[in-house]
Image: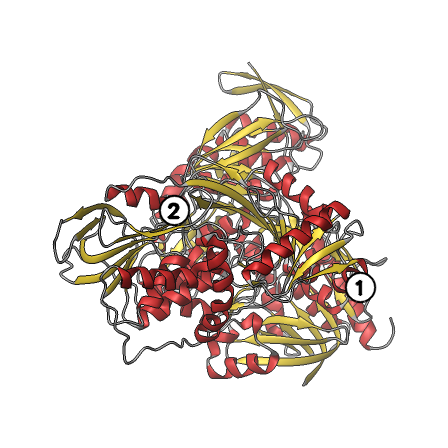
Amino acid sequence: MPLIKPSPNNNTIYDVLIIGGGVVGCAIARELSKYRLTIALLEKEIELAFGVSKSNSGIIHPGTQNKFGSLKGKLCVKGNKLIRKIAKELGIDFKEVGELIVAFNDEDIEHLKDIQKEAKRFGIAKMKIVDRAWLSKNEPNLSPDIVAALYVPSAGIISPYRMTYDLAENAAKNGVEIFTDNKVLKINVLKNAQVPFEISTTQSIYRSRFVINAAGLFADEISKLVGVDDFTITPRKGQEFLLDKKRENLTNHLIFPLPSKESKGVLVIKTSDGNPMVGPTAQSVNDKEDRATDEEGLNTVLSFVKRMVPSINGHDIIAYFAGLRPVAGDDFIIRHEPKVPGFINVAGIQSPGLTAAPAIALMVVDILKNNGCRLQKKKIFNKFREKTVHLFKADRKKMKRLIKEDERYGDIVCRCEMVSRKEIEDAIDRGARTLDGIKFRTRAQAGRCHGGFCTTRILKILSEKMKVPVTALTKRGRGSIVVMGERKV
Amino acid sequence: MKKEFTCIECPNGCRLCVDVKDGKAVSVEGFKCPKGEKYALAEIENPTRILTSVVLAEGLSLKMVPVKTSQAIPKRLMMVAVDEIKKLKITQAVKVGDVIVKNFLDTDADLIATRDS
Amino acid sequence: MIKRDLIVVGGGPAGMAAALSAHEHGVKDILLLERDQFLGGILNQCIHPGFGLTYFKEILTGPEYADRFIKKITAVKDIEVSLKTFVTQLTGKKVLTSLSPGRMDEIKAKAIIMATGCRERTREMAHIAGTRPAGIFSAGLAQKLINIEGLLPGKEVVIVGSGDIGLIMARRMALEGAHVKAVIEIQKVSKGLVRNVVQCLNDFDIPLYLSHKIIKIHGKDRVEKVDVARVDENFCEIAGSQFEIACDTVLISAGLIPENELIEMAGVVMDKKTNTPVSDKVNQTSIDGLFVCGNAYQIYDLADSVTKDSILAGKMAAEYIRGKL
């Protein structure tokens, strides 16, 4: 994917400029790339998906547990359907594993029935309340204290960052210009002008007819730049804990407790790469970059999930992290701002934002259409993307063929997750610039040794391919340099 | 002045107590064997250490060639020695035991390679 | 499918000693698989002296100790060495799958010796709270960066754990010009050799904080500081004892874990707590003819002990192949 290095003189006049390279911004970019528009996407971090999207659970929600009539509910149900098609077109692994919302007593079962009733109004199909016998057969590691569960088969799992990258890659292929490491500082709004927006960034100045604010945690700050300040984003921290891949078959479904008012609760999650994950917590924080984990978070999560799956063991945890949900009240804020014609806010996209992203993109297209953006479909839109190869997912036959075709597939760099040199080099060709970028795309360094064995090799490959010294490489951009000196004579 | 330290000659790890006057050891206590006494005297009057490090290589299969001093060198020279090593570059293949610098820093010790390059 | 008498997986001290010993005990068809482009394993990055005292009766550095075995292996024609070869699969029937650049092979052996070594416990396994900035390294990774790649991981360093690896890295970082501000040890005493406490810490005036632990790591992009506190008998933080140390680097030296995922895959009965095979005899597993030696069998303090037990593993495999075990 061509990540464009911003130049100080950008004379292009864009029809649409998207601020934010998370899953929402990238889904919008890809949807808009079907039309004859000149589009730019700006991301403040060095790589895409480095904000909210990187620490998403990867769950494609069916749409239960949302209020009827809410944007969240509507877009989630629609997104759940759309994502299947997009996953096929873009070669993203999507697995419909289904979810179980569990009940410990009769009172809980009544609660499940309410959820089921509400969900039916959304049009969620094939749900059923399953009993103890069903659970014993289909989910043997579940606590015997669980008496029943609401089974929702349409829940699925996907890799949130790969979904973001693949949407962006396809958007770029269809003409969207993507600029990273490019933070928006100021937006000038020229009244009654043909091209009303002048966006100044840390790297350049862009001019555009329409601006879409998909800036995640910073959407309130971007909106303020054009004088719309009627909402604030409050980060809500979620700590997640990843288990060793050896425990891949810990559960067969996503396991949910009954939801509370603030969140869907602490879950036992299956992930697209096989490692089970437990979490998240839900704590409101002040700092939009506070991604620290703590012992309390770990203990809370363990005590919650052990109640549902008693065999979960702290020893199986190989990694943990914290993400921040961009919360702006109870629902998503997706609207054109009449005070600033041409400015569209897409804010407060917390859970189920990943699921809803494709539906949000369609909604944004409608908003553009209704507000004077001329939309004409392109004659040629390339909707397909060649599936990224992951050696660890290939069967023996495919593995043998791959290695024969390109010997670099036989050169293993990351031993814990079985990632080859070829995959690392491909990731760099597709836009990875940092150790984390390589990790999110390939899983190298994400396994049980946590990069202890492969980091040096990855640094060397990055340095060779990017033609920069190892001392300039970072973990995730900005000041996160990896090594602080190199022997030179 | 009394100085206390641990003998490192063998796993016994005797706690040695040395009476020092004008930089010279007057008496040593606490050792279980003569090695301890000898070690204590050396530690007070002229402590020495084997230094190991790596030397930058160019055009060889190794990027860094590990090296060591062929015998212990005075402890006080440690950082000077490291600075010298940082200035070196090996451009021709070496084998284990090959001398990189003879009579390193006039210590009588040679700096030798500890791995085939 | 390729068939061999003996496959040794791993070309570090354990694998080399096992292969040589099996050969001395009569096995004439040996394949030694090594992931890296060199033989020697982790010894190549252990450039400090302290190896060989019991086995060779002299003090050697890690690379010198390895070199003695590498030269011997290279001289034995019956031992075929395959470098850059990575084993991805192992079955209970002693069939393994290996990948190397441009190749994928399935090989069946009469006997297999796994000498796969160990990995380091990570910050995650030690459950150290805080952020995840750049600048947190396992001690072994830092050692590799400095000694193999000539790279300096950081300049202001705090080390977690005072085992020998932690101590040796404290000295190594100090010699490279870094300021090692503290070694933090949760236990009451250092687990390392007295010699290393003296020569690695005292020589460089590096403070050792016993009965202390890191409470939290701070820093958004790169490590900025750590919170440290004194702990009680149960390793719990003593209220009011907390203080902070500014640093840009944290090295984790929190112990080693045998790498035994392949034998686990093959169905060997494992002790989950130590990640080692359950067995009543050294080097043995629950699968006949599948042996484990070196740090994969148990974590040894000295390379010399690895050599000693691995020689035995080679002998056991030879006897098994001859039907005498």
- Which of discs 2 and 1 lies nearer the camera? The answer is 2
Q: CA distance from mark 2 to mark 1?
A: 44 Å
Can residue A476 be seen by looking at this rendering? yes
Q: Amino acid at mark 1?
A: Thr
Q: Nearer the viewer, residue C236 or B116?
A: C236
x, y (%) of residue A179?
27, 59
Position of C264 compared to B8: left or right?
right
- Specify how the rendered protein is coloured: secondary structure
**Mark 2, residue position:** A480
x, y (%) of residue C14?
67, 61
Position of A164 compared to C308: left or right?
left
Per the image, label 2 sits on a secondary structure element best described as loop
Position of C89 compared to A237: left or right?
right
Give me the chain letter of mark 1: C
Q: Nearer the viewer, residue A313 or C196?
A: A313
Can residue B111 be seen by looking at this rendering? no
**Quadrant, the C terminus of chain B:** bottom left
**Quadrant, the N terminus of chain B:** top right
Respond whether the residues carrying marks 2 and 1 are from the same subunit: no
x, y (%) of residue B46?
50, 30
- Label annotation for residue C285: 1
Give me the chain letter of mark 2: A
- Label annotation for residue C181: none
Q: Nearer the viewer, residue A105 or A4?
A: A105
Per the image, label 1 sits on a secondary structure element best described as loop
Q: Is residue C83 above or below residue B51?
A: below
Task: In the displayed orientation, state which residue is furthest to the right.
Answer: C324
Q: Is residue C186 above or below residue A406?
A: above
x, y (%) of residue C55?
69, 54
